[in-house]
Amino acid sequence: MSTAFTPPLDDLRFVLDSLIDVPAVQALPGHADTSRELIDAVLEEAGKFSAQVLAPLNREGDIKGSRWKDGEVTSAPGFRDAYAQYCESGWNALPFPVEWGGQGLPNIVSSPVSEMVMSANLSFSLCPMLTAGAVSALVLVGSDHLRKTYLPKMIDGSWTGTMNLTEPQAGSDLSLVRTRAVPEGDHYRVSGQKIFITWGEHDMTENIVHLVLARLPDAPEGVKGISLFVVPKFLVNPDGSLGARNDVRCASLEHKLGIHASPTAVLNFGEKDGAIGYLVGEANRGLEYMFIMMNEARYAVGVQGIAIGERAYQQAAAYAHERLQGRDISNPRGPTAPIARQPDVRRMLLTMRAITEANRALSMTLASLLDHGRAGNKEAQALAEFLVPIHKGWATEAANEVTSLGVQVHGGMGFIEETGAAQHLRDARITAIYEGTTAIQANDLIGRKTARDGGAAAAAIAAQIRAAVDALDERDPDLTAIRARLASALEAFEASAAWVVQNYAKDPIAVHAGSVPFLVLSGLTCGGWQMARMASVARRRLDAGEGDAGFNTAKLKTARFYADHLLTRVAGLREQVLAGASAIAEFPEERF
Amino acid sequence: MSTAFTPPLDDLRFVLDSLIDVPAVQALPGHADTSRELIDAVLEEAGKFSAQVLAPLNREGDIKGSRWKDGEVTSAPGFRDAYAQYCESGWNALPFPVEWGGQGLPNIVSSPVSEMVMSANLSFSLCPMLTAGAVSALVLVGSDHLRKTYLPKMIDGSWTGTMNLTEPQAGSDLSLVRTRAVPEGDHYRVSGQKIFITWGEHDMTENIVHLVLARLPDAPEGVKGISLFVVPKFLVNPDGSLGARNDVRCASLEHKLGIHASPTAVLNFGEKDGAIGYLVGEANRGLEYMFIMMNEARYAVGVQGIAIGERAYQQAAAYAHERLQGRDISNPRGPTAPIARQPDVRRMLLTMRAITEANRALSMTLASLLDHGRAGNKEAQALAEFLVPIHKGWATEAANEVTSLGVQVHGGMGFIEETGAAQHLRDARITAIYEGTTAIQANDLIGRKTARDGGAAAAAIAAQIRAAVDALDERDPDLTAIRARLASALEAFEASAAWVVQNYAKDPIAVHAGSVPFLVLSGLTCGGWQMARMASVARRRLDAGEGDAGFNTAKLKTARFYADHLLTRVAGLREQVLAGASAIAEFPEERF
């Protein structure tokens, strides 16, 4: 079975060339050195590292997983060495501020690097991803002392970070957090149980820095009484060396459907005297800080959906070339042919490919907006914030579909674990759940991102989509077809957004009932927008004889496929949004 | 975690009352004794057996699985006893001919019994399902001697049966079968390797009767050179006692994504002298016999999709009632509320429920057609044959969606195996693959079932849907909405079927490219037809004060939901069928 991973460098370069204003990012503060040559070199090296070091560990990581014994966790075979190499090569430091030892590269570089790492080994990638979340929290609101103590080690990867939010009774609803933090001198004593802590315990580094949401004794109830604390596994002496073991213990690891190599820990804080913790930022503002960092984490999980889709696609395509079964329809008396010649296999592969390419292009467009937003461009930031829940929600829902198609392309072999296709399905399944379920993303989209600004961000996106529609050259039959489909999707997007704005306050149940369909409609339409832009470029290049003609033809046909098979879903989603609430509201609850 | 199973007796009775002409089935030869009281009693007892004996074994069966050692297979804990009880209670004999010891009950009774067994324990249910296939083959074309030797034991369940079709190089394409059968006196010596043999080896019975596709030495190539053989695990002496161990050996079991308790065997025939086998029917007609029996097996797998969806729904609904998280939108200052009050959770539960109820109703309508067809009604048989691939294909694709939603309703807990929701997702995944993938069903639908009769069966179904549309009372707002949605879906179904008929010969690639979307469109529309019929009955009962008002309201609202959220998908599917082929045909194969 082919489980190799080929970094999608061609597609990433095409996106950078055709969709991203790279010079505009280079002109942002701190990015003057981010030349196109540097970007290409970084992507190439990251691709090699992902393919050669991380991808070969993915299958055994699934089989053997991380193992818990007496509170200690042994990481999956090879992970410890791979992590050391990852840090030595500087990959961990890529996106972080230069002043703390990072390389300060923009999102348009760090995001495709992450994508390849995630494709190669989703379980592995979660460890640096969680560290990045913790680093961001400290950069954002940590005291100078906390920053100096923790950031250099976390940025060079010597210590990893975790995010401790969830408790058994507090998942999507963090107002229910019960973990307590009691002041004691310059620190606090933290006690309580946290669950679902990704890479919450492991043996890859000598220390782990837990960021923990907890309540002070006098804190108000609900979300306004939650504070953020640093709770290191080992205390840190004034000279930076490690001190005593803190009172935090890994009680168990979860047995999960997928990402077996990523240890999902139950952490007990304060079983003895209370774990020593340090307040991050101001008291009672913990959830607010989390929300500020959430864009980043949600963005990253959306990229996971794309990454796992890419990996599943590559494996399915390889199998479709190899597997001989049935005849070529256009040559029914010919020899047994590869299934890649079967129209329905081609339909499945193109669905996987079209979704992946569209969502990758959207993620890169969003990365660029996040770069401009971080540099203070408010308009870019507003667009980015509108797009984050769409990207996170749809790219991860799509990952479920894409990886399931990957199994289907394999037929019976897809159901056999040895093949590896099923692992992608299992691994992908968490992405639409963690960092906020799709419904949580959709709530954010309809409320904070659409209704609150009266639809301004939605209208700005719509204007950009309109421009992409208008730019489609009607002399080409593919572009003409794409134009009609995208115009129709855009109209549905605008109508749905307007409906959300109008009804959010007066009929909240109806708007919430259609929130996920609105998110998916938006995701499909924004993907179509990117596909249209890429199709225009591919057509121009074909006409000019520029670049790889095969690549450009494939891109154009994939965009056409997206229009005919994905954008056509929008009509039904529109009905779900605008006219789907009555049964949801009226079904008698006790009859479920 | 709630993993109990509640037999859906209310819904099954409602379907029998409102959709099925039970007296017409009773009037068929051999079914005079099938009174409504008998049916109700059988369903109730089967429900009890499923819930009390089979459902409790489902989770441990997943964890422990069947185990292979030195060619022998130990079934999962409790399965052997449960199987003995199953046979003692007569469940195995339910659908089989009375002359061979069966109970001869019609499909409208045996199908819902099977559904409940499958809901309770899909892995378990596969063993009697495969036996049923083997029994049918022998009833259909076995010699008197073979019938007398094998049927009574297989019908009372003392021996189980298997179907040996697939080989490593011959899956969907059985023309590639290589297993050989060489004549020797009154029998044959069979040698070759078969894979994916469900319940191919186990310890639940003293003998296993393998039905095996193989080639005679002088057989023509391709599908017209395949013959069918009985190859028992133990030879049978003239007095019916067991003789020597035959030369068939279980080389291994597959490690699968799901249905872990169902042993999927690699069987090696003839490692020594050749396994002794007996020709079933005439030489070289094996595949033809398989096709005759295929309706039954494909029908049964479609029911599996419904069954696993029902189980996943029940578990998700129970969790949604128990899990407190967030507030009730209509009472935002109230206490933390069950998530069953969240609009998006309700949307997910209703999607699961609506699909399951619609597909169950269609499966029962189809069961009745199969009963009439078996009794010689050609018109009913033609409609049944048209509906079988739609039912098999769509109910199993839908099972992937429904079980994935079941995980999503659980949030993070859904990803934890202990919860049980993930098992349903894993178990369901095979149903759209075995007994012919969805693409194989779709090929059958567009070719043998739609194009070959010039669309006659499709038109007959359309006429029945039209009648259901016309019967919807426009004084009720729900029925009015359903009417508009179903009429629109029907129009798309008719246009798509007409297009398939017109283009099947002249543009086969285009028709095959849209075959799965056409199947899904047909499945959704036929589900909408059944939902409309049930909604009319529910409305009438509500108006007349008949039956359980809560049940009837739930049915009406579920039908309304189906119209607004499922039938609305048809518009997009129609475009995929009618205008989706170009990119599929034109994408350069080497670029996948």
Image (spheres, coloured by chain):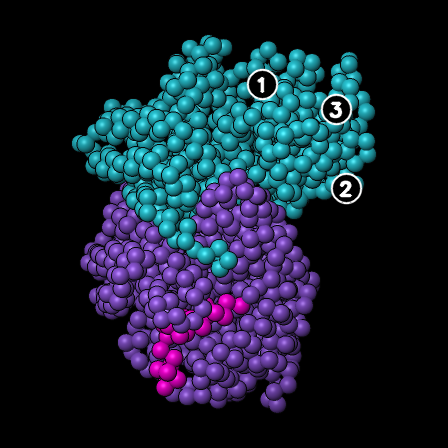
Chain colours: A cyan, B purple
Query: Label 1 is found on which chain of the structure?
Result: A
| Quarter of the figure that contains the C terminus of chain B | top left
Three-letter code, disc 1: Leu
- Asked whether B6 falls inside the magenta stretch, the response is no
Is B564 displayed left or right of B271 in the figure? Answer: left
The reply to the same-chain question for discs 2 and 1 is yes
Q: Is residue B378 visible?
A: yes
Residue occupied by mark 3 = A183
Three-letter code, disc 3: Pro
Residue B471, x across and y down, in percent: 26, 67
Residue A140's mark?
1
Residue occupied by mark 2 = A69
Q: Secondary structure at mark 2?
A: strand
Question: Of the residues tagged 2 and 1, which is closer to the observer?
Answer: 1
Query: Label 2 is found on which chain of the structure?
Result: A
Report the span colored magenta. B7-28
Identify which residue is drawn at 40% across, 29% down. A452
The reply to the same-chain question for discs 2 and 3 is yes
Do the residues under discs 2 and 1 have CB atoms within 8 angstroms? no
Which is more toward the observer, B534 or B3?
B534
How would you rate the neighbour count of disc 1 (Cα within 10 Å): few for under 14, some for 14-19, many for 20 or more?
some
Residue A110, x across and y down, in percent: 51, 23
Sequence-wise, the earlier of marks 2 and 1 is: 2
Is B235 displayed left or right of A349 in the figure? Answer: right
Predominant secondary structure, magenta span? helix
The reply to the same-chain question for discs 3 and 1 is yes
Question: Of the residues tagged 3 and 1, which is closer to the observer?
Answer: 3
Is A341 displayed left or right of B142 in the figure? Answer: left
